[in-house]
C-alpha cells in the first residue's frame, strides 16, 4: 500500500510539472541577452535608413531653422543689398565726375565697414552660415547629428527591446497560469509567447519599455535635434545644451535639466508611440497569418506568425510605423518646437511650456500647425519600421534557436 501511494504521488508530481508553464517563458539571462542582440541590430539598421528623413522632418517641424535666426540673417542681407546698390550709384557718379571718385570710394568703404560691424554685432554662430533650405541640403548635411545615435541608439534600442521581450515573457507566463486547464497551455513551448500571447500583453510590454528608456532617450534626442537644426558637431551640441542658461556661472543641476526639455511631452511620445507601434505590428502579422491559414485552422485563434515571409513582415512593419507616427505626430511637433525654442531662451522649458505652445499654435495658426511635416514623417516611418522590426524578428529567432 505504501509503495502504491508513493508511485501515485510521483505520478501526480510529474503530471503537475508537465502542466505548469515553463520557466523559460519568463525573465532569464539568456532571454535578456537575446533581446539585447536583436534590439541592437535593429537599432543600427533603423538609424542608417531613417536619419536623413528624420533630419528633414525636424527642419520642417521647426519651420526650417531656429526662430529669430532667419530674421537676423534677412536683416543683414537687406543691409548688404543696400550697400551694393549704393556702390553701383557711386560708380555711375564716378564715371561722370572723376574728381569726386576718392570721396565716393571713402563713402563706399564706410558703408562696407558698417555692414561688417552690423554682421558682427548680431553675434551669430559661424555654423549658421551653412543654414540652407531643406531642398538644398546635401545628403551629408542630412546626416548631421548621426554620431550620437550611432553611438547610443544601438544600446538604447537593445535595452528597449530587451525590456519589451522580458515583459512579454512574464505576462505570457501569467496568461498561461490563468489558462492552466487549457490543453494548449499544457503543451506550450518557450517561443510561443511571440505568436500566441494576448495583444494587450504586447501593448503593455511596449508601453513599459518606452517609458523606462525615455529617461535615456531624452538627452540623446535633444542633442540630435540641435545638431540637425544648427549643423553642430556632437561635442559642441552637448556643450551648448549644458551651458545654456548659465550666464557664465557653472550650475550642474540646471545644465542637466536642459537635456530634459519638455520631458512630459517626450515620455508621452515614447510610451504611447511604442505601444501603438508594437500593438499594430503584431495585430497585422496575426491577421495576415490567419488569412493565409488553410481551412482546417481558419476558425482557430492559435495561428503562428513564424511562417510569414520577409516581404509580408516588412509590409506589416511599415504599416505599423506609419500608424504610430500618425497617432503621436502632434506631440512630436510640440517636442521639436520646444527643442528649437530652447536655442533662443535662457530659462529651461518644461511640459507646461509645451502645453502653452500648443495652445498658442492652435490659436494663431489653427490645428494644421500641429501637422506640419507630417507627410515626410509618415513616409519616413514606413521604410524605417520595415527595416527595424523584421530585422528584430529574424535576429531574435536566430539567436534563440
Image (cartoon, grey):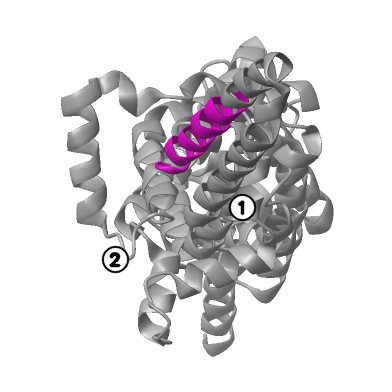
Name the residue located 39 percent from the left edge and 36 percent from the top edge: 333
Q: Which residue is mark 2?
A: 347
Q: Is residue 386 above or below residue 346?
A: above
The answer to whether 190 is drawn above or below residue 238 in the figure is: above
In the rendered view, does 337 fall on the left or right side of 166? Answer: left
Rate crowding at label 1 as few (under 14), some (14 to 19) or many (20 or more) other CA atoms within 10 Å: many
Name above or below for residue 25 compared with residue 368: below
Q: Main secondary structure of the magenta part?
A: helix
Question: On the picture, is 174 further left or further right than 353?
Answer: right
Compare residues 359 and 88 and report the one nearer the observer.
Answer: 88
The answer to whether residue 206 of the structure is visible from this angle is yes
Rendering quarter of residue 161: bottom right
The answer to which quarter of the image holds residue 102 is top right
User: Which sits in the foreground, 239 or 277?
Assistant: 239
Q: Which x, y percent locates residue 187?
A: 61, 50
Disc 2 on helix, strand or loop? loop
Q: Residue furthest top?
A: 295
Of all residues, the one furthest to the front in this rendering is 99
Q: Which mark is residue 291?
A: none
Instruction: Mark yes or no: residue 320 visible.
Output: no
Whole-Å distance between the Cαs marked 1 and 2?
A: 20 Å
Q: Is residue 69 magenta?
A: yes
- Relative image position of residue 358 (x, y in whole percent): 24, 37
Question: Which corner quadrant holds the C terminus?
Answer: bottom right
- Asked if the residue under mark 2 is in contact with the one under mark 1, i.e. CB atoms within 8 Å, the reply is no
At 49% from the left and 67% from the top, the residue drawn is: 241
| Left/right of residue 151 with respect to residue 246 in the rendered view | right
The residue carrying mark 1 is 227
Taking the spot 47% from the left edge, 45% from the top edge, the residue there is 274
Indicate the position of residue 63 as horizontal and vertical percent values: 45, 31
Image: magenta residue range: 67-84
Amino acid at each position: 500500500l505504501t509503495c502504491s501511494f508513493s508511485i501515485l504521488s510521483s505520478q501526480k508530481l510529474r503530471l503537475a510539472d508537465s502542466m505548469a508553464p515553463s520557466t523559460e517563458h519568463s525573465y532569464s539571462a539568456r532571454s535578456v541577452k537575446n533581446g539585447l542582440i536583436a534590439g541592437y541590430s535593429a537599432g543600427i539598421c533603423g538609424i542608417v535608413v531613417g536619419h536623413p528623413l528624420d533630419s528633414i522632418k525636424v527642419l520642417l517641424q521647426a519651420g526650417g531653422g531656429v526662430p529669430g535666426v532667419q530674421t537676423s540673417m534677412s536683416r543683414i542681407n537687406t543691409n548688404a543689398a543696400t550697400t551694393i546698390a549704393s556702390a553701383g550709384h557711386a560708380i555711375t557718379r564716378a564715371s561722370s565726375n572723376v574728381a569726386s571718385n576718392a570721396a565716393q570710394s571713402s563713402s563706399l568703404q564706410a558703408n562696407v565697414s558698417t555692414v561688417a560691424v552690423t554682421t558682427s554685432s548680431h553675434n551669430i554662430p559661424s555654423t549658421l552660415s551653412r543654414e540652407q533650405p531643406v531642398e538644398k541640403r546635401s545628403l551629408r548635411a542630412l546626416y548631421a547629428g548621426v554620431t550620437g545615435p550611432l553611438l547610443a541608439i544601438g544600446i538604447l534600442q537593445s535595452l528597449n527591446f530587451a525590456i519589451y521581450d522580458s515583459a512579454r515573457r512574464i505576462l505570457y507566463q501569467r496568461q498561461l497560469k490563468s489558462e492552466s486547464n487549457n490543453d494548449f497551455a499544457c503543451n506550450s513551448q518557450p517561443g510561443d509567447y511571440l505568436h500566441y500571447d494576448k495583444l494587450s500583453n504586447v501593448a503593455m510590454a511596449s508601453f513599459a519599455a518606452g517609458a523606462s528608456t525615455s529617461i535615456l532617450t531624452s538627452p540623446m534626442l535633444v542633442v540630435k535635434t540641435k545638431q540637425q537644426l544648427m549643423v553642430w558637431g556632437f561635442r559642441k551640441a552637448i556643450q551648448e545644451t549644458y551651458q545654456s542658461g548659465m550666464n557664465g556661472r557653472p550650475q550642474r543641476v540646471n545644465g542637466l535639466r536642459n537635456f530634459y526639455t519638455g520631458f512630459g511631452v517626450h515620455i508621452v511620445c515614447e510610451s504611447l508611440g511604442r505601444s501603438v507601434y508594437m500593438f499594430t505590428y503584431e495585430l497585422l502579422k496575426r491577421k495576415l497569418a490567419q488569412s493565409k491559414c488553410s481551412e482546417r485552422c481558419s476558425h482557430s485563434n492559435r495561428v503562428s506568425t513564424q511562417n510569414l515571409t520577409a516581404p509580408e513582415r516588412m509590409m506589416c512593419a511599415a504599416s505599423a510605423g506609419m500608424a504610430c507616427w500618425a497617432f503621436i505626430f502632434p506631440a512630436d511637433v510640440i517636442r521639436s518646437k520646444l527643442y528649437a525654442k530652447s536655442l533662443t531662451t535662457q530659462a529651461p522649458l518644461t511640459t507646461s511650456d509645451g502645453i502653452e505652445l500648443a495652445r498658442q499654435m492652435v490659436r494663431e495658426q489653427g490645428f494644421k500647425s500641429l501637422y506640419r511635416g507630417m507627410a515626410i514623417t509618415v513616409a519616413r516611418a514606413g521604410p524605417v519600421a520595415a527595416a527595424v522590426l523584421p530585422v528584430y524578428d529574424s535576429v531574435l529567432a536566430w539567436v534563440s534557436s
